[in-house]
Amino acid sequence: MKHPFQIVLVNKAGTHLFASVKNHLQVFRLSDGKVVGSWIDTVDMFTPLKKQQEEKIKVLQEQNKQTEESENNEIKNESAEPAEKKSKGNDSKPIKIPKIPVPGPGAPPIYNYIRSLALSEDEKHLMGTTDSDKAAIIFKVDLSSEGNCLTLIKRQVFQKRPCAVSSDQETLIVADKFGDVYSIGIDNEAPVDEKELSPILGHVSMLSDVLVATYNDKKFILTGDRDEHIRVSNYPKSYVIKNWLFGHHEFVSNLHIPEFDSSLLVSGGGDDYLCLWKWYDNQLLSKIELRDLLLPFLEEFHLPPERFLTDESQKEISIAKILTFVSKKSQKKYIVVLAENTKCLLTFELKADNTVTHKQTLTTDFPIIDICLISENSSIIAAVDRETSDSLLEFYTLGDEDVFEVQSHTDIIQTITSANECDVEKRREFYPLYYINTLRKRSEH
Amino acid sequence: MPKPHQVQVIKDRETQLREQQEAESKRRTYRDVKEETRKKHKKAHFEASPTPEESTSDKISLPRKRYYRQRAHSNPFSDHRLEYPRSPDDMNWEKLFPGFYDEETKQMTSSVEIADVGCGYGGLLTKLAPEFPNSLILGMEIRVQVTQYVEDRIIALRNKHEDEDVNFQNIAVLRGNAMKFLPNFFRKGQLSKMFFCFPDPHFKQRKHKARIITNTLLSEYAYVLKEGGVVYTITDVEDLHNWMVKHLEEHPLFERLSKEWEEQDTCVSIMFNSTEEGQKVTRNKGSKWIACYRRLPNPEECV
């Protein structure tokens, strides 16, 4: 069987699918499922640890030098016993080379996989982040190329693990798990030493999503964090905070600005609802309740971890993805929501007066890991959590009455799935597919 | 003879341990009693008609610091079980400043204008109270017991000076993490002064983000400060002073105030002389470094 796809992403024209599995990145032509681009992350997982070791050695050498110097000074003062002691001192002090630190048994495992992916506005670049070496990766995308359409042009390592990306023309915006946001050029220039980078803004909380947004030709950065904050900062003068959007009780995991109206924002996370905002006006338009709709799809998995489990514990909702589109048939506007590890997709109609009504609950046979949307024909591609070798994707097409229908088995899906190179023996070898709910705060103090 | 000596040591340890436990339980009992008073007192403000005889006849004694001692450090990144309002609109200020709540209009007559971030035992608050009788002054402290001490201190002061001009109704304290939740309490441009007195130096390089003054946090302070508002910093750690100055200098929304300005400013002298930490530094003949910065206007194109 194959390891499920973890991230799926489609270009605006809906001609190509970008998908990641573990450290593999593949680009498929959707007309026939042919692989037109691929990249495998071959980074040495021990690079950061080796770097630490090198630094320690440097520090030790520095210290040694200093003690030697001070000893030499002492010797000068005590002129009675000169050269002999000096040489002795040098010989007896070889630098102890520290070992490469090995993570202890309790340490969280580091997986070599791609955590986030995004296309630049002009779709000439694909940007992502890796967990293994805490890097942002930038690819040049050339879909007209005969060979591999992906060329890695930059790999910028950060001090803390980056987890979300957005972009503004020639600039990549990276948010990290330490709460900071950095900007780096989308270019061929050599990466900067990570110590020389300084954040353009920061929260004192783990960041979960970042967006560059425009309002009346002014640019802003929107950031969501593990507390319940969404912050709107001016950009590029990101040190001037515009305001906070208050409405969430739990962590924020997903920020989405519809293409059809960039003054709107839909946000979701650990709450039982989504928030619909006029983000520039600092106005909460409505809360979209999800619990009743999702309840039939919540399972054991959605309960809190055992040590936090009480009789009152409810099953928890975590939002994995929010998308929006305009139906080509009816011109109506819709929001699509995926909650983590559920066998359903919810759609809501967004009316002209900004009220939201539930439209459809699309039930699927397998939990959905990630979705992407082709606006051209209002169809959805989903990566599904399945133990199989031939159908790791599902296509949902918009039928009459703007209702999605499952188109579960096509030759293209089969072609794409068999091109997935990550074979596994059993489910246990899957990388963690669901980790959004770990953002939930469970304070004990 | 080594043997009896060892016994002596063990015995000492036992005694020490016992004494420690006794002391701790004594401290706890003391704090429990105080907590009762605190609860009663807090309740009194919200119940329709507290019997006036009761509240005046019960003289509440000032709390004693030694029963509230707590380790000087706290991890600002940890998910403490904190109470904080969902947004500034949801904050019940009348609980903290009952004297500034208009029963008729159900509105506060004033809003917090001065914040002491990491107020410790509240020395600065009590000295600022008479200087700014019409401004609300809020102390924020992350350590539970220290916050309780300040609460008890304010209750006792309000009780003691009830009928006087300076009645300490304009100061209050709350437990909170200002690094994470400052915008939950204060609106854009609400504050005119922010104090950072003797903050935790967090010496280790990798702990530097835990410092209260960083480039990224300064943007949040700039957000809650009004144009012309002032950030006051004081520390006895020269490295930290240099760090704070460096970051404030680098931030485009702050401008350093001159030595002359510092000399004529009342708050600077209060900050220099009146905080517990400041007095300790004076006793130990240490140095104190001061830096004050004014909030500049936003660049024109920013909103």
Image: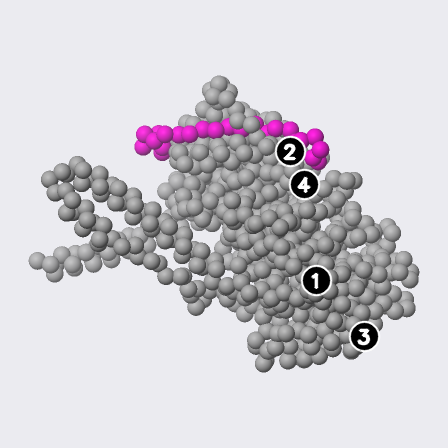
Rendered residue at 44%/59% (across/down): A50
The residue tagged with tag 2: helix, strand or loop? Answer: loop
Considering the numbered disc 3 on the image, is that residue within a helix, a strand or a loop?
strand
Residue at 43% of width from left, 41% of height from top? B200
Task: Report, in whole angstroms, how far the alpha carbon at label 2 lies from the one at label 3.
Answer: 54 Å
Image point 34% across, 31% down: which residue? B286
Mark 2 and mark 3 on one chain = no
Q: Which residue is mark 3?
A: A407
Chain to which the residue tagged by mark 4 belongs: A
Range of magenta residues: B280-303
Residue A98 image offset from top left, x and y in percent: 35, 58
Name the disc covering residue A310, or none.
none
Earlier sequence position, callout 4 versus callout 3: 4
Between the residue at mark 1 and the residue at mark 2, the CA separation in whole angstroms equals 50 Å
Depth order, front residue of B193/B93: B193
* Label 4 crowd bin: few (<14), some (14–19), many (20+), radius 10 Å: many
